[in-house]
Every structure is written in structure tokens, then in C-alpha cells.
Amino acid sequence: AIERTFSIIKPDAVAKNHIGAIYNRFETAGLKIIASKMVHLSQEQAEGFYAEHSERPFFGALVAFMTSGPICVQVLEGENAVLANREIMGATNPAEAARGTIRSDFADSIDENAVHGSDAVASAEREIAYFFSTEELCPRTR
Ligand code: CMP
């Protein structure tokens, strides 16, 4: 089925000038970017986005990292978009990510792992709504 998923290019990958290379991975995989913007998260925005991890030991470091510089947020649309994006991202830990995946090629550590992608359609809907209004979504008609 055609799905939408939410994606972040994290501060490490933006700082290393990998935005275009990562967008190319999305498009090469057949995913269409239907919304896109750059933002620098506040502490409150980062804590809210990652609220489900608030009890995890890495939460403080995660929020500090995600507020350390600008990020790119985008909505990707396509056949099985949630799983398709997870496949091209690779495992959360770059050391375990398959060769040729975004995290294998562009990330250095589990904390600074270049990209985020929704893990399910329900979380994608919530994450998209956290960053984008309905008017900011631009589904393709051609
Ligand atoms: P992300 O998909 O953005 O969701 C939460 C992030 O926490 C995750 O990617 C990792 O970058 C980071 N993180 C750090 N340590 C861990 C861990 N042990 N397990 C899962 N995520 C972790």
C-alpha cells in the first residue's frame, strides 16, 4: 500500500554536508519527498518528539545531540514507505547496519546515526503531525 513516513536528517549528517546525498538515497529508492524543511529544535521540541524515550538512560544525550544543530525533516511517500525507509537507513547502530545503507555510509555511532525514520504507520502519522501542518504536505499529482 502507498504509505507516508516521517524522516529526519540529524545534526551530524547536516554538519557533514550529506543532505543531498541522503535525499538521493530516498529518491533512488522510489520514495517521494512530499514535504521538507530545515529546523533547529528547541529543548522542548526535542523532548516532546522523543517523549517515548524519556525514561531511557540515553535520553539526555539524545536531546542534547538533536538540539546541537539544524536538522532536515521530511515526509516520504511511496509503496510500503515505512519499511522501505527503514531498509535504506539500516540498523540503528551504524556498526550493525548493512553495507550500502545510509547509516553504514554516513553515521559514526548509535548516538549520532545520521537519520531517524518512523517505525510504524501509526508513529509516522504522529511524527508527521508534530512537524507539519496539512497544508505543508504536497502529494504528487504527476
Ligand atoms: P532514533 O530513531 O532517532 O530514535 C531514538 C534515538 O536514540 C535512536 O535513533 C538512536 O540514535 C538513539 N540511541 C542511543 N542509544 C540508543 C539505544 N541503546 N537504543 C536505541 N536508540 C538509541
Image (cartoon, rainbow, N blue to C red):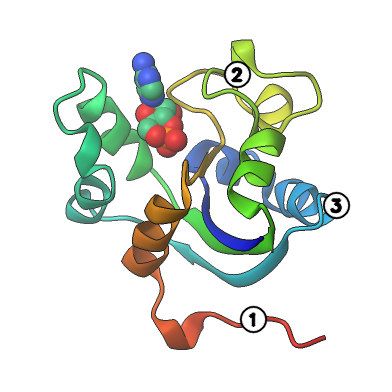
Residue at image mark 3: 28
The answer to whether 28 appears left or right of 23 in the picture is right
Residue 64, given in percent of the width and then of the height, sits at 28, 35
* Amino acid type, label 3: Thr
> How many other residues sit within 10 Å of disc 3, few (<14), some (14-19) or many (≥20)?
few
* Amino acid type, label 2: Pro
Q: Nearer the viewer, mark 3 or mark 2?
A: 3
Residue 62, given in percent of the width and then of the height, sits at 31, 31
Q: Considering only vertical position in the picture, is 66 above or below 81?
A: above
Task: Of the two numbered discs 3 and 2 on the same chain, state the one appearing first in sequence.
Answer: 3
Q: Considering only vertical position in the picture, is 136 above or below 62?
A: below
Task: Of the two numbered discs 1 and 2 on the same chain, state the one appearing first in sequence.
Answer: 2
Residue at image mark 1: 139
> How many other residues sit within 10 Å of disc 1, few (<14), some (14-19) or many (≥20)?
few
The answer to whether 48 appears left or right of 100 in the picture is left
Q: CA distance from mark 3 to mark 1?
A: 18 Å
State which quarter of the image contains the N terminus.
Answer: bottom right
Q: Considering only vertical position in the picture, is 27 above or below 47?
A: below
Confirm or deny contact between disc 3 and disc 2 (CB under 8 A): no
Q: At x 67% / y 67%, what residue is drawn?
A: 33
Using the rendered view, name the quadrant where residue 96 is placed. top right
- Mark number, residue 123: none
| Beta carbon of the mark 1 residue lies under 8 A of ligand 1 | no
* Residue 17 appears in the figure: no
